[in-house]
């Protein structure tokens, strides 16, 4: 048991002293998850609106597919992205393997179904009169999209937070596509996995605490926004 | 008429279907600019569908709708913000009253100042801007919300204001404010008003034209009464329909026993005592309401007969002679030959 307490103690020392290796993993994670979230929101919000707003043949099948992709295993995404961007893959010449942008691509794929599915649900659950109202007041297609997303903002915020949580905490993609290269593509989660394997608990615990703190900060800001939006 | 001489709306062979079922069929219909048209008819008769089509919120399944002589479709810049619908349960966006009212103006862009216009629109529906402008959307009563929704449309100075039962679920004061605000819009900007309503003071005191809708069919001009099916074979080779109180309607045989029959309300004869005559069907009922049709100076009487509500048109002189008041027992007579069958699309 003693080594665990020692690990926790050392974790605070690392964080307090702004240990360079720990900070590098934190920075890599924040960079890569921000990039992947930006991509998944830019693509996912219009797609989610389209899926939730329109009625079309085969809609139920598309919803089922998107819902299935919610539980996409991270190692499978890692495998597919690895295959695509490795030297022999079709996107090999782009040189994305073992880079942060490479990880971001994989994480965007992971987050996209979450954003699409939860946005579609949020838009679907809006009052049917919303669309009639917006169009009656002169909204064009773009204004209809933006105003509907704004009206559904709490549901969409929940979608973004859920997707962010999934992206922040995944290991499979970062490990397989990023290669867990120290000072370069080592993220918080891959660092925790590696350090724990080596029996080095301090850095693992420190990074775990940072992950928890980020999750806490995100949730606090969301509930703050919710309270002040009314 | 507008400069092109075309009517404001022109519907040609319009049909609308939901889930494969025909809910509205209009062979031909014209609406002149600046008119006030009232739509009356039972729930599910197609009033809301017609309003949504006229508001270009949906495209008809068949046929076309011309706006000022040219076909228009949803999102057409010619109609955006100019033709506006006030739905029965209006949606207020999650923002303040002032922001709700200003929404349409902001969509238009431009440099005009929104605040004075928002205040003017709120005042027009009888909501004091200083009390209501900053209120959030959830701190309003049903009648206030309806008036805010109307203000959001009036601020656009629309060419056409479509209203779906605007006074159905509001108190008398809100109803009067809504009516006055809509009439002011017509007086100020020549706004064409098309109102679906069960509110008799709208329909008979204010409207230039009242159209009846029944089972998806539009009967422009004139007052009508509908006798819905199912019909069964009766004596003397006629069809009959049993009412809840045991009386029978009679009709000449048609094609579809489930169809409804319609009669021009002028062909319903009223008398205090039954006057038996060959070929007349006589029904006992009660006078429910009497209202003046302003334009024709006739009186429309609503009568309860069995489970049906009938409307008859009377001369004021005849009314005086019979001294009818609501609650009086009355006899209604008609000739089966005066009934016409409605090929009811909703009956299948």
Image: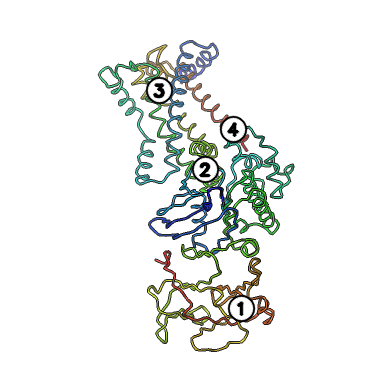
Distance CA(mark 3)–CA(mark 1): 77 Å
Distance CA(mark 2)–CA(mark 1): 49 Å
Give residue A225's mark.
4
Sequence-first tag of 2 and 1:
2
Marks 2 and 4 close (CB-CB < 8 Å): no
Closest to the observer: B124 or B247? B124
Give residue B73's mark.
none
Q: Secondary structure at mark 2?
A: loop
Question: Residue under circle 1?
Answer: B286
Q: Could you confirm whether marks 3 and 1 are on the same chain?
A: no
Number of the front mark, 2 or 1 = 2
Distance CA(mark 1)–CA(mark 4): 60 Å
Give residue B78's mark.
2
If the image is split into quadrants, where does the C terminus of chain B sit? bottom left
Closest to the observer: B261 or A34? B261
Q: Could you confirm whether marks 1 and 4 are on the same chain?
A: no
**Relative to residue B339, is residue B175 depicted above or below?**
above
Number of the front mark, 2 or 4 = 2
Sequence-first tag of 4 and 3:
3
Horizontal and vertical percent for residue B64? 43, 52
Number of the front mark, 1 or 4 = 1
User: Residue drawn 53% across and 12% down?
Assistant: A18
Q: Residues within 10 Å of mark 3 (few under 14, many from 20)?
A: many
Q: Secondary structure at mark 4?
A: helix
Horizontal and vertical percent for residue B169? 62, 58
B37 vs A113, left or right, is right
Q: Residues within 10 Å of mark 1 (few under 14, many from 20)?
A: some
What chain does mark 3 sit on? A
Question: Residue under circle 3?
Answer: A104
Marks 3 and 2 close (CB-CB < 8 Å): no
Horizontal and vertical percent for residue B94? 60, 41
């Amino acid at each position: 048991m003693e080594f665990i307490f020692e690990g926790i103690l050392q974790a605070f020392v690392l964080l307090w002293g702004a240990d360079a290796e720990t900070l590098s993993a934190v920075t890599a994670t924040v960079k890569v998850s921000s990039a992947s979230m930006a991509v998944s929101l830019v693509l996912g919000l219009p797609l989610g609106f389209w899926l939730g707003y329109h009625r079309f043949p085969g809609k139920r099948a598309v919803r089922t597919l998107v819902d299935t992709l919610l539980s996409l295993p991270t190692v499978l995404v890692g495998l597919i992205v690895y295959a695509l961007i490795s030297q022999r893959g079709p996107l090999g010449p782009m040189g994305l393997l073992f880079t942060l942008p490479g990880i971001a691509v994989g994480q965007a794929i992971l987050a996209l179904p979450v954003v699409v599915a939860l946005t579609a649900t949020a838009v679907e659950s809006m009052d049917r009169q919303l669309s009639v109202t917006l169009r009656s007041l002169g909204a064009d297609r773009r204004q209809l999209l933006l105003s509907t997303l704004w009206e559904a903002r709490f549901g969409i915020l929940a979608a973004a937070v859920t997707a962010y949580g999934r992206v922040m905490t995944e290991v499979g993609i970062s490990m397989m596509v990023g290669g867990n290269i120290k000072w370069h593509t080592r993220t918080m989660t891959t660092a925790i996995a590696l350090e724990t394997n080596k029996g080095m608990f301090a850095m693992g615990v420190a990074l775990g605490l940072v992950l928890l703190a980020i999750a806490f900060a995100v949730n606090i800001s969301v509930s703050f926004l919710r309270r002040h939006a009314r | 008429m507008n400069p092109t001489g075309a009517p404001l709306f022109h519907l040609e062979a319009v049909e609308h279907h939901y889930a494969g079922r025909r809910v509205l069929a209009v062979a031909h219909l014209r609406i002149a600019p600046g008119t006030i048209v009232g739509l009356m008819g039972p729930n599910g008769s197609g009033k809301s569908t017609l309003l949504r089509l006229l508001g270009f919120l949906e495209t008809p399944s068949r046929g076309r709708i011309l706006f000022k002589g040219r076909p228009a479709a949803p999102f057409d810049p010619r109609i955006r913000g100019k033709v506006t619908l006030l739905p029965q349960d209006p949606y207020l966006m999650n923002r303040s009253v002032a922001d709700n009212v200003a929404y349409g103006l902001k969509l238009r862009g431009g440099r005009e100042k929104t605040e004075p216009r928002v205040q003017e629109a709120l005042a027009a529906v009888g909501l004091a801007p200083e009390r209501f402008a900053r209120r959030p959307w959830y701190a309003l009563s049903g009648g206030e919300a309806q008036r805010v929704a109307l203000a959001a449309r009036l601020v656009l100075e629309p060419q056409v204001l479509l209203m779906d039962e605007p006074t159905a679920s509001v108190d008398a004061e809100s109803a009067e404010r809504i009516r006055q605000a809509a009439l002011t819009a017509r007086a100020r900007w020549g706004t064409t008003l098309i109102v679906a309503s069960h509110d008799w003071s709208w329909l008979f005191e204010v409207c230039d034209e009242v159209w009846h809708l029944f089972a998806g069919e539009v009967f422009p001009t004139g007052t009508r009464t509908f006798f819905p099916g199912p019909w069964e074979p009766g004596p003397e080779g006629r069809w009959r329909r049993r009412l809840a109180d045991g009386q029978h309607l009679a009709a000449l045989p048609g094609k579809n026993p489930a169809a409804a029959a319609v009669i021009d309300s002028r062909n319903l004869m009223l008398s205090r005592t039954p006057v038996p005559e060959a070929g007349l069907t006589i029904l006992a009922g009660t006078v429910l309401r009497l209202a003046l049709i302003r334009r024709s100076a006739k009186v429309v009487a609503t009568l309860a007969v069995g489970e049906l509500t009938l409307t008859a048109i009377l001369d004021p002189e005849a009314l005086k002679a019979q001294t009818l008041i609501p609650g009086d027992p009355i006899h209604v007579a008609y000739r089966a030959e005066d009934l016409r069958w409605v090929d009811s699309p909703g009956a299948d």
